């Protein structure tokens, strides 16, 4: 390799892999341009985290990446008045007010009902806005499932 460190604080160059945690049941392996978890377990997650309340930055990011989560939740029956807009809440564990949220309805609802937008309004809660463009009252079936995905702001 042509590149060599010239850091004034000092540096070390290794010709092979570097592994931490050899005395434990899990660790991290630095190999060429790959970081991998190593473990006595058949499967192991790789966890990246900042120190204290610090997050993780990727490449040329200008914002801290605080983590991601995904799952699904159900919503109770919602009656929508004719040609009306209604907001309902959906429980999303771990969601924060400034987190970026994506919601997808897994269960087919009436084509008369539109999911307009969603936002995080309180910890562990999202507000969904529904529109009924019909001239009669419509309702969302009991236990309609919504899949969600969010990115933590910090």
Image: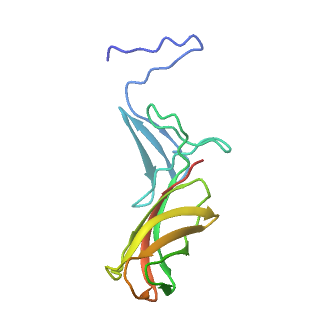
Residue shown at 43%/33% (left/top)?
59
Above or below residue 62? Residue 9 is above
Q: How many marks?
A: 0
* Quarter of the picture holding the N terminus: top left
Taking depth in this image into account, of 22 and 72 the one nearest to the observer is 72
Taking depth in this image into account, of 37 and 84 the one nearest to the observer is 84
Residue that sits furthest to the right in the current view: 52
Residue shown at 49%/60% (left/top)?
69
Above or below residue 94? Residue 154 is above
| Place of residue 129 in the rendered image (x, y in percent of width and height, measured from the top left) | 49, 70
Residue shown at 50%/84% (left/top)?
78
| Place of residue 124 in the rendered image (x, y in percent of width and height, measured from the top left) | 61, 67
Residue 140 visible (yes or no): no
Above or below residue 137? Residue 21 is above
Taking depth in this image into account, of 49 and 115 the one nearest to the observer is 115
Taking depth in this image into account, of 151 and 59 the one nearest to the observer is 151
| Place of residue 90 in the rendered image (x, y in percent of width and height, measured from the top left) | 54, 74
Colour mode?
rainbow
Residue 57 visible (yes or no): yes
| Place of residue 43 in the rendered image (x, y in percent of width and height, measured from the top left) | 40, 60
Residue shown at 49%/64% (left/top)?
118
């Amino acid at each position: 390799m042509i590149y060599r460190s010239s850091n004034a604080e000092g540096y070390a160059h290794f010709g092979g892999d570097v592994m931490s945690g050899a005395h434990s049941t899990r660790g991290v392996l630095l190999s060429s341009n790959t970081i991998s978890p190593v473990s006595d377990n058949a499967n192991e997650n790789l966890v990246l985290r900042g120190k204290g309340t610090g997050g993780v930055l990727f490449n040329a990011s200008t914002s801290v990446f605080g983590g991601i989560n995904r799952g699904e939740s159900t919503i109770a029956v919602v009656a929508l008045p004719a040609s009306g807009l209604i907001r309902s809440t959906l429980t999303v564990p771990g969601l924060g007010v400034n987190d970026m949220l994506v919601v997808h309805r897994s269960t087919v609802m009436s084509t008369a009902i539109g999911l307009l937008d969603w936002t995080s309004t309180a910890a562990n809660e999202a507000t969904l806005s529904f529109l009924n463009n019909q001239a009669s009252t419509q309702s969302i079936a009991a236990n309609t499932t919504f899949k969600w995905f969010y990115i933590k702001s910090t």
